[in-house]
Image: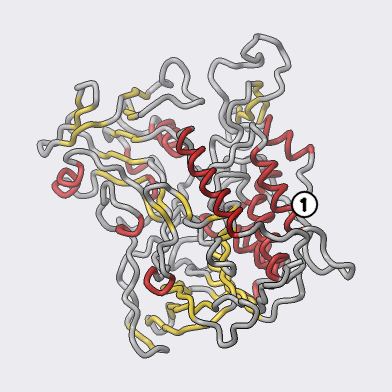
Amino acid sequence: MAGENEIRVKSVAIIGAGAAGAVTAAAFKAENYFEHIRVFERRETAGGTWQVPPGTPVPSLWIYDADPPPGPPIQPGSLGGEVDPPLEIPANLPRITPPNQQERYSQTPVYASVTTNVPDIAMSFSDARFAYGPFAPHYIPRQYIENYFSTHKTDELLVLNTTLEDLSQIPASEKKNGAPNKWKLTLRKYDPAQHVDIWWEEIFDAVILANGHYSVPYVPNVKGLKEYSAKFPGRVIHSKLYRSPQPYTSKKIIIIGNSASGHDLSEELVSTAYLPVYQSRRSTSRWDGDAPPAGIEWKPIIKEYQLDGRIIFNDDTYLDDVDTVIYCTGYQASYPFWNVKANGRPLWDYAAGKLIGAYWHTFVRDFPTLGVIGVPRSLTFRSFEYQGIALARLWSGRNAQPLPSQEEQEKWEAERAERTKREKKRFHDIPWDDGETFEWLDGLFRIAGLGTLKGEGRIPPALGEDLIWAVEHIRKYPEPGKGNEGDSGEKGDASGALVKVGGEEGDNEWVLVRRSVKDSLAFI
């Protein structure tokens, strides 16, 4: 079905061994078509966001980085490419060099109490469930991803401790029927036995970027923040460095942001910090009630940091003698390996917050042998599965439906960019409640089609009623004031939130609190 200009791909490099890389490797192996598949992972083990800390032996009881290094100073308002610039590539590869000292943001953002935010049935791949749920502690997805590689015998494809430092298109040795260019990967592997970096190059027909986007922290630009941070080192941090409330005992704390991490940290710090814990919010969120929870005081956004230590808010109130400010303001996409000169253009538009030349959030219009998995805000693990299968079917030439023409792909991107800008939404956010998630996954489903008669290739999974029910009914956090009745006061409203209740360890259970649906994927 690939048509006259069939893309002939025999070798594939997958960048990242998190959830997206795990299911993509399984999909490509299942085709029994590709001659050479490699999964490059810069950490010591598979697991992505859920990995063990750098330097920790894999067979260890440690499940997160309990004592992360302080990292470089915050860079307010800086873009991902500025915060995470490319490394200088040594000449005359292959080569051995002293280990890199530049910050690469490989540390994960996992804190001790974090659990998944998506019900396990929707977060698991279709052929294996989490050990338990619905909201699993962080070590469960890490173990799950590691086991997934082993179960599918794709662990033999892993190249660990290896970072992609440059990705460049090169002319194919033979260009027949419009065959696309190949890709040159410049790779750096840290050898812990010799304490050196080993550099080399490899050539692949196609590349899939499955490297995630929870690495480079974002801190907004606020008047005086850069100077304040320089005068008071360590006083302003990003939530990526937070691990537990104990170090903040009796400290005066400001939390910036009220999304998932801002919500978690504010409530957790009440147990140890000097009260109240101040939470600076730009706007209310769906889980905020009419008044803050006990021990928390809401504040507007900060408008200025002063060098005498005073922090001034938008309503002209202020705080003095603050011990720590924690920014829970998310992360930026970063592709420091993307060679703009060799590839003719950037990959990411920071102003628009989107992939350039994207089609269906997965394909790249002017680079037909480049795929990107995991960018959209959607069903996380399960959506990665649809994307990986669609790319595997497409590049094996077994796709049931061809991609649209270049013109149609360009039209899709332009129309979506215009609509999301008009509606003040993010380009890669895919809502659930208006049916857009179904449309997106169905598009990938139709491209992929069925496997071969001999069983080669994975089939995109059905979006079953049990999964749909879980997404629409089960919530980690309740919406205040809804109780067991909906907005209309009618009992038995069709949605709700699972809330953990109980006191002593081992005595907790999850109960369903009914509520109305607004954004079923709000916490992703």
- Kindly identify the residue that appears in the image at 58 percent across and 41 percent down: 430
**72 versus 41 height, above or below:** above
Q: Is residue 26 visible?
A: no
Q: Is residue 226 left or right of residue 461?
A: left
- Kindly identify the residue that appears in the image at 13 percent across and 47 percent down: 231
Which image quarter holds the C terminus?
top right
Q: Is residue 100 left or right of residue 147?
A: left
Q: Is residue 374 left or right of residue 232?
A: right
Residue underneath mark 1: 461
**331 versus 258 height, above or below:** below
Please state the horizontal and vertical placement of residue 81, each as a whole percent of the image: 34, 59
User: Front-most of 1 and 433?
Assistant: 1
- Kindly identify the residue that appears in the image at 19 percent across and 22 percent down: 316
Which image quarter holds the N terminus?
bottom right
User: Front-most of 22 and 179?
Assistant: 179
Residue at the extreme front of the image, as rendered? 407
Mark 1 neighbour class, 10 Å CA radius: few under 14, some 14 to 19, many 20 or more: some
User: Front-most of 134 and 409?
Assistant: 409
Residue 215 picture quarter: bottom left
Q: Secondary structure at mark 1?
A: loop
**461 versus 204 height, above or below:** above
Q: Is residue 400 visible?
A: yes
Please state the horizontal and vertical placement of residue 519, each as a whole percent of the image: 58, 31
**486 versus 422 height, above or below:** above
Please state the horizontal and vertical placement of residue 312, each as a whole percent of the image: 19, 29
